């Protein structure tokens, strides 16, 4: 697998080097020819008048371009294209040249000599520095941006069977690490912008879709093909405008709108076949039998079958994605309506996810265009059937598919009478095939969000705006495990059913005043906003046991038994809580001579989830930029087309780790108690109170440089940042006594993230017929826990070494938070060998004759971190005439993975009740008391993530079709790694337990066909 | 400009209410308000009792893994969960039996957390809230006795322990008090309060401290006073026992054979669904999954026996076994031997398909015991509702037989009447189908009788420490039919008589000092 990749890369590199001078030469030649012909033509051009007509279209899609400008070179005469991309123009002089330009495309110049029809297809300018970026509460030209931000739009988005919008940006932006663990239908992706900034849950960036703010789940309800662009705000000077929610970064999404004067009907579809990319090598039945005999395991454990459990539980999956969109508009009104479906059938039995999406957006102008009204309605219905998680036997609970490792290959799946095999002699035996076939685990989600925006231009430059949005997420979950599922809980309960309803309502409104003014070389753009947000969460849960039959699953709970033996304290519950955030914010952008730029912002946030002593916080930022290329002394430096220096500093907050009611000492129910001769509900204090609880504060400085060389053929951005999270929210260990709980959420410690991000893009070939573009980025990150101890209400905290793993507690969790080390440091007992009895021996580091597995044990070694030190991607694309091909290679490295699966399936002591990995034989381990570094592996990888090839058909002769493209995408074609587990792309989200491979839904390799049709 | 100002002031007016960011609580009670409610004080008292039944996560006195009693049983000579050759059970249980624990041992940390996070905190809260509410003095006394009970458990396990009676103190004012000082607090608190407790038995006071269970606790505290302070308190113990014997109205529950009783003897009704009032002084009411759980038998039996002896569909855990040397000490005529299940024709129910356990235990660590090795306990023959998470047998913390044996022991230790002591032990023996022991009665006799009568009831570690056997070698060397069938538990250093202060507790509070030897 390694060889082709390396040779490809080498070839490509040579190709780049060789072609470079040739292209330069050709360009120069062309330029000279143009100059000459211009000089000659000018003398005799006046007399003839001729009418030139033609069509201007997009070179990649063939879509007509509406409103493209055609100007006769050297004059002010010109016209623009109509709704069909057509134009007609009187040209005087046979040798005139037309300059055809359109925002976002490379301008073209063409001679009219001897022509009456001049058609022109324009090449989109993918790396244009004057593109518009969304910055939160407004937009800016990228060239005027002072902070660190990345924009990914249009052609740059990953293609293929996309089910979650984040898949479109994986590998596309430096410092933005998108991770997908396995390929479970409907499963979310994790994204981390500039590292781990928080420890208890506040690492997900804020998501803003057309002004609607939300958590990552907001992404689930968007149709990926309806997304116009992603803008990712990375540094604090950019995110400080989002105050106490800005610290983990912000992802702004702009959805597609119709263009004035153009009506379109467009279909987008992909269909893929999804296969399992990699499997673990477990023992076959024969191998298991050999080992059983060798290890003297009683023969009664062999049930005489030959079952490939993993095969039995998996199949080929599929993903389909269809979107039909239509829209149009006039100068004053435009609309866009789309409907779509994303249908996923997973590779594990009974796991699928079907989403249906609809959207209407419309904009109306009134009062001489002073008033702009925009409305947006978005709905999503999602029906998921999930493979049950958290199943297994004592000591190992994971998803259903990982239990296929557990089952002995000699166990039959079915008894001769077709009932599910069950082995009573194994404690909590489960038959994973029975689980996959009989457990019902369904979720229906209804998402609805809408927004309304009104902007009124009070006077020239001064606009008042009102924006309101509401989002409803209703989720209905149903679960039923029958007795025959073999799950212990279901057998005990004789059928276990539960339903849950979770309702979520998010409301937001803001009122803004925006003022723009230019006086001479001074440009001002200022905004003040008042904003109010509220999120309300409500729900209930009911559980029943002991059903006479399994037919009704979770749909008739009243059929369950009401006998006391089948009713538990936790069987019914309901909840309601909410959080409110009130904010005042302002921002001023000031530009002088279009080269010195200053951005200042301030936000003041008050949140209900903060403790009573800390309700309000301030989040200021300042950033400056210098467009060096605008300076006169740069006018002679031809090689540099763009050069901008940026620097910024900002204070942002993070409050997502705080739930409602975190700061209060409350009394909740806590099971039942026998008192006064009967059972009554017991009440207890729920947590340690902390009236000082507040947001985390992230102080970040950023220095960046944007450059474009050789007429912007080579563009790049380099950013360096230094961010420190203080007032770190964490469940600090507090002494008991006096606290009733051993941990307390408080603001004490600090974490540092420092990094460098480099993005480069080089247009190696740029001709009308052929383009070759090499893009890539690399990010280096250094994460460090600066402090976890400190003083809390006079208590000296002593949390300098905190266990941060949850999988191997019995064997001494090896993942830690340690002062001075990265989050997720492997502080681990070192493997030494194996003793005569087959037990693992480990290094007694301090030589005291005892192996201490305590957290601060002197026998532990520091063996690296679960956090990658670098991530990178390489995204070349090539077009030739109507053919295009693009690739995404991405990877990360410098991290370690604790391979719990390897550990769990390597000890022969469990052979009697479980299968083992083939590799266990060579290790020959019977047992171990330790979670040693034997299971620690290098987590570096390079993945050939995406290969897309497309072909655009000529549609000139088709009556109803103006654009037609078919494409082929292959995902996850190759993986280069030393990791021996299923896939090295595991959770690197920094949360408790990350860095451990405890079994995952298989990752797929997909092959997809895509179709894009634009109708006339 | 006027227009703008108008709009701005209008909007500000409209949204002036939208600047409040107070927390709304819809689904919980604020603790200050809740405990001030008329039901709040009672709820605070009930909340203390809620800490006593065992539950998952190591909560409680008895009933689930890692509870107080579990630690005291598992570290003694009478129970062990061996590592199995089939791969079941981690080694940490065997290590408790082998007395190889370190300060980082999770089991010990769990018990510490229970004592301080749950038990003592809730007792302090109840004392506070009941006092604030000017509740019935007997309820305040009850909460104080509960607190004394927890402190007694704390000094028994850990020696010098943090001591506080006010939940609102900063940790710097919570010193690690000397064992003797806490002992004095316990004695003072009990003597000041137990007479205020009602005398009612059963009914509303089933599962609660009444006057006699207060005396039973006081007797226990005195019994171990010499261990706690170095000063013998056996005479005081006799006085407390006499209070119960003379005023309590208790008697030994009959031991007679009775087919409708568990295991065929009325004696085992003591360990049935509800503890009988005649002998039980303090009970833990248990309903599995609702109020605690009793896993003693479910955890002991192996797999298919669960479905036969616990409830249909239940796979039992193949866990705790009784070492053969413990069983060997029983007189074959002793009805109490019915609690052990082993051999081809075991004691107790014999439903078709029952498993045969071998009364031998030659390896408990590596490679481990065979699946059917070790006798099992069916002392708490599962009472319904029962499932894989345990059964609903209530549990007696203190019962009359214990009091009789305690008094007998104290009589011997104070050179009291040997005949009286023997009479007390004889009462217990006769009920078990045995005859009186020969005179003179020895302390060894009482020690052994306590072992027979109170197997797995949570006193063994304490008794072994008091009788000086805890750190000595046990197990091993025992042969049956010429075959060594027991593992050897080597003698350990004296410091094992106290558990270490858990590493996590010391990490969180640097003022705590580790017990010597660890």
Image (cartoon, grey):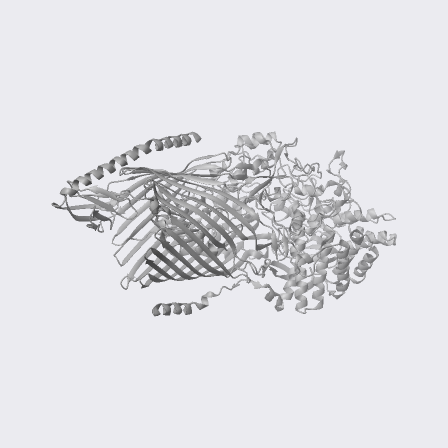
Image-based side of A1013 in relation to B81, left or right? left
**A334 and A489: which is toward the camera:** A334
Residue A887 in sight here: yes
Image-based side of A487 in relation to A971, left or right? right
Residue A682 locus on image (x, y percent): 61, 60
Residue B174 locus on image (x, y percent): 69, 57
Labels in figure, total = 0
Image-based side of A32 in relation to A860, left or right? left
Residue B63 locus on image (x, y percent): 66, 51
Residue A157 locus on image (x, y percent): 37, 44
**A262 and B296: which is toward the camera:** A262
**A29 and B261: which is toward the camera:** A29
Which image quarter holds the C terminus of chain B? Answer: top right
Residue B285 in sight here: no
Instruction: Looking at this view, name the residue that lies furthest to the left.
Output: A47
Locate residue A947: give its quadrant.
Answer: top left
**B282 and A957: which is toward the camera:** A957
Q: Is residue A776 above or below residue A648?
A: above
Q: Is residue B62 above or below residue B82?
A: below
Residue lying at 35% horizontally and 70% vertically, measured from the top left: B2
Which image quarter holds the N terminus of chain B? Answer: bottom left
Residue lying at 44% horizontally and 43% vertically, measured from the top left: A757
Instruction: Looking at this view, name the residue that lies furthest to the front.
Output: A633
């Amino acid at each position: 697998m390694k060889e082709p990749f390396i040779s490809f890369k080498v070839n490509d590199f040579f190709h780049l080097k060789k072609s470079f001078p040739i292209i330069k030469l050709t360009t120069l030649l062309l330029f000279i020819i143009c100059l000459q012909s211009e000089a000659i033509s000018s003398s005799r051009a006046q007399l003839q008048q001729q009418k030139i007509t033609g069509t201007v279209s997009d070179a990649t899609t063939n879509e007509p371009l509406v409103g493209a400008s055609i100007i006769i070179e050297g004059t002010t005469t010109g016209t623009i294209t109509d709704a069909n991309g057509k134009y007609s123009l009187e040209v005087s002089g046979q040798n005139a040249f037309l300059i055809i330009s359109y925002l976002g495309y490379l301008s073209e110049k063409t001679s009219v000599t001897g022509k009456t029809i001049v058609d022109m297809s324009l090449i989109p300018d993918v790396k244009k520095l004057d593109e518009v970026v969304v910055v939160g509460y407004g937009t800016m030209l990228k060239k005027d941006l002072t902070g660190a931000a990345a924009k990914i739009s249009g052609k740059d988005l990953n293609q293929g069977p996309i089910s979650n919008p984040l898949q479109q940006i994986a590998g596309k932006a430096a410092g933005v690490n998108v991770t997908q663990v396995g390929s479970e239908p409907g499963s979310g992706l994790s994204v981390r912008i500039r590292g781990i900034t928080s420890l208890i849950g506040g690492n997900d960036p804020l998501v803003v879709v057309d002004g609607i703010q939300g958590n990552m789940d907001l992404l689930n309800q968007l149709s990926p093909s309806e997304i116009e662009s992603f803008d990712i705000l990375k540094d604090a000077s950019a995110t400080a405008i989002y105050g106490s929610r800005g610290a983990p970064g912000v992802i702004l999404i702009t959805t597609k709108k119709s263009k004035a004067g153009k009506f379109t009907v467009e279909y987008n579809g992909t269909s893929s076949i999804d296969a399992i990319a990699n499997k673990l090598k477990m023992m076959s039945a024969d191998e298991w039998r050999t080992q059983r005999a060798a290890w003297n395991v009683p023969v009664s454990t062999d049930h005489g079958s030959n079952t490939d459990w993993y095969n039995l539980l998996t199949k080929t999956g599929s993903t389909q994605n269809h979107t039909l969109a239509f829209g149009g508009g006039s100068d004053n009104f435009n609309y866009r309506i789309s409907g779509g479906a994303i249908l996923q059938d997973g590779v594990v039995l009974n796991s699928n996810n079907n989403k249906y999406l609809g959207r209407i957006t419309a904009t109306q102008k009134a009062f001489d265009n002073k008033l702009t009204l925009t409305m947006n309605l978005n709905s999503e219905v999602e029906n998921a059937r999930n493979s049950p998680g958290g199943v297994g036997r004592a000591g190992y609970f994971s998803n259903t598919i990982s239990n296929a490792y557990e089952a002995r290959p000699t166990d039959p799946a079915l008894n001769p009478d077709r009932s599910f095999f069950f082995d009573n002699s194994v404690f909590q035996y489960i038959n994973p095939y029975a689980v996959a076939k009989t457990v019902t685990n369904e979720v229906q989600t209804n998402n609805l969000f809408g927004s309304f925006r009104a902007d009124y231009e009070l006077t020239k430059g001064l606009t008042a705006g009102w924006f309101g949005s509401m989002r409803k997420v209703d989720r209905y979950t149903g679960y039923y495990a029958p007795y025959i599922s073999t799950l212990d809980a279901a057998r005990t309960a004789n059928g276990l059913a539960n339903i849950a309803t979770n309702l979520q309502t998010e409301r937001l409104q803001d009122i803004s005043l925006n003022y723009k003014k230019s006086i001479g070389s001074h440009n001002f753009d200022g905004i003040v906003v008042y904003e109010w947000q509220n999120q309300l969460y409500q729900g209930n849960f009911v559980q029943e046991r002991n059903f006479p039959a399994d037919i009704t699953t979770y749909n008739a709970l009243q059929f369950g038994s009401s006998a006391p033996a089948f009713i538990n304290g936790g069987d019914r519950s309901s909840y309601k809580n909410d959080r409110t955030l009130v904010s005042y914010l302002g921002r001023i952008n000031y530009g002088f001579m279009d080269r010195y730029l200053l951005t200042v912002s301030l936000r003041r946030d008050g949140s209900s989830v903060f403790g009573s002593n800390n309700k309000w916080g301030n989040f200021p930022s300042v950033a400056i930029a210098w467009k060096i290329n605008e300076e006169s002394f740069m006018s002679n430096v031809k090689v540099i087309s763009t050069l901008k220096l940026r620097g910024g500093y900002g204070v942002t907050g993070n409050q997502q780790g705080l739930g409602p009611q975190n700061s209060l000492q409350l009394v909740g129910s806590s099971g039942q108690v026998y008192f006064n001769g009967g059972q009554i509900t017991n009440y207890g204090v729920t947590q340690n109170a902390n009236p000082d609880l507040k947001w985390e504060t992230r102080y970040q400085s950023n220095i960046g440089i944007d450059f474009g060389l050789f007429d912007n053929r080579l563009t790049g951005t380099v950013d360096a940042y230094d961010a420190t999270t203080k007032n770190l929210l964490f469940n600090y260990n507090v002494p008991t006594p006096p606290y009733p709980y051993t941990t307390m959420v408080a603001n004490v410690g600090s974490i540092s993230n420092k990094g460098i991000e480099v993005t480069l893009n080089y247009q190696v070939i740029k001709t009308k017929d052929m383009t070759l573009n090499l893009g890539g980025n690399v990010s280096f990150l250094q994460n460090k826990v600066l402090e976890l101890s400190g003083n809390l209400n006079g208590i000296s905290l002593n949390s300098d070494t905190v266990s941060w793993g949850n999988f191997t507690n019995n064997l001494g969790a090896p993942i830690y938070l340690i002062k001075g080390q990265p989050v997720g440091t492997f502080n681990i007992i070192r493997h030494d060998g194996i003793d005569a009895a087959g037990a693992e021996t480990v290094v007694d580091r301090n030589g005291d004759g005892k192996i201490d597995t305590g957290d601060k044990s002197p026998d532990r070694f520091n063996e690296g971190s679960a956090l990658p030190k670098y991530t990178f991607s390489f995204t070349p694309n090539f077009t030739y005439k109507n053919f295009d091909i693009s690739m995404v290679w991405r990877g990360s490295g410098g991290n370690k993975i604790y391979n719990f699966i390897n550990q769990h399936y390597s000890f022969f002591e469990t052979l009697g009740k479980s299968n083992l990995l083939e590799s266990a034989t060579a290790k020959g381990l019977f047992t171990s008391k330790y979670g040693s570094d034997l299971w620690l592996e290098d987590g570096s990888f390079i993945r050939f993530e995406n290969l897309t090839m497309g072909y655009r058909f000529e549609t000139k002769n088709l009556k109803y079709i103006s654009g037609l493209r078919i494409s082929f995408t292959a995902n996850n074609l190759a993986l280069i790694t030393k990791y021996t587990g299923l896939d090295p792309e595991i959770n690197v989200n920094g949360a408790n337990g990350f860095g451990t491979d405890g079994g995952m839904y298989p990752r797929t390799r997909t092959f997809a066909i895509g179709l894009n049709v634009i109708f006339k | 400009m006027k227009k703008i100002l108008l709009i701005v002031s209008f909007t500000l007016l409209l949204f002036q209410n939208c600047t409040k960011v107070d927390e709304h609580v819809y689904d919980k009670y604020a603790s200050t308000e809740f405990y001030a409610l008329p039901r709040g004080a009672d709820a605070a008292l009930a909340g203390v009792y809620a800490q006593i039944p065992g539950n998952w996560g190591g909560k409680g006195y008895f009933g689930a893994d890692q509870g107080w009693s579990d630690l005291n049983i598992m570290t003694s000579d009478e129970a062990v969960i061996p590592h199995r050759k089939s791969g079941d059970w981690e080694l940490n249980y065997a290590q408790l039996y082998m007395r190889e624990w370190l300060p980082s041992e999770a089991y010990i940390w769990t018990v510490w957390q229970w004592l301080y996070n749950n038990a003592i905190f809730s007792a302090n809260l109840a004392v506070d809230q009941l006092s604030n509410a000017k509740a019935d003095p007997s309820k305040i006394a009850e909460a104080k006795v509960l607190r004394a009970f927890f402190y007694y458990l704390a000094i028994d396990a850990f020696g010098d322990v943090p001591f506080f009676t006010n939940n609102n103190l900063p940790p710097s004012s919570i010193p690690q008090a000397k064992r003797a000082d806490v002992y004095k607090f316990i004695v003072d608190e009990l003597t000041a309060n137990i007479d205020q407790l009602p005398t009612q038995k059963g009914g509303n006071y089933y599962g609660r401290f009444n006057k006699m269970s207060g005396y039973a606790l006081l007797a226990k505290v005195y019994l171990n006073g010499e261990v706690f302070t170095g000063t013998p308190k056996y005479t005081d113990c006799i006085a407390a026992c006499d209070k119960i014997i003379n005023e309590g109205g208790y008697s030994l529950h009959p031991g007679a054979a009775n087919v409708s009783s568990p295991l065929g003897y009325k004696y085992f009704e003591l360990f049935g669904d509800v503890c009988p009032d005649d002998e039980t002084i303090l009970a833990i009411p248990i309903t599995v999954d609702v109020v605690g759980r009793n896993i003693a038998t479910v955890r002991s039996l192996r797999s298919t026996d669960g479905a036969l002896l616990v409830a249909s569909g239940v796979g039992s855990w193949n866990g705790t076994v009784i070492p053969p040397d413990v069983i060997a000490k029983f007189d074959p005529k002793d009805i109490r031997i019915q609690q052990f299940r082993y051999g081809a024709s075991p004691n107790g129910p014999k439903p078709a398909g029952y498993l045969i356990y071998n009364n031998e235990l030659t390896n408990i660590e590596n490679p481990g015991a065979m699946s059917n090795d070790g006798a099992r306990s069916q002392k708490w023959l599962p009472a319904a509702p029962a499932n894989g998470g345990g059964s609903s047998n209530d549990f007696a913390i203190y019962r009359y037989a214990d009091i009789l044996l305690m008094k007998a022991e104290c009589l011997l230790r104070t050179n009291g009447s040997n005949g009286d002591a023997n009479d007390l032990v004889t009462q217990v023996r006769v009920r078990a189908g045995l005859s009186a022991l020969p005179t003179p009665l020895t302390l060894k006799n009482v020690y052994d009788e306590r072992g027979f009568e109170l197997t797995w009831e949570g006193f063994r570690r304490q008794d072994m420490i008091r009788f000086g056997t805890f750190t000595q070698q046990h197990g091993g060397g025992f042969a049956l039919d010429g075959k060594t069938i027991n593992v050897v538990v080597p003698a350990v250093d004296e410091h094992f008589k106290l558990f270490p202060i858990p590493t996590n507790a010391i990490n969180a509070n640097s003022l705590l000092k580790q017990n010597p030897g660890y």
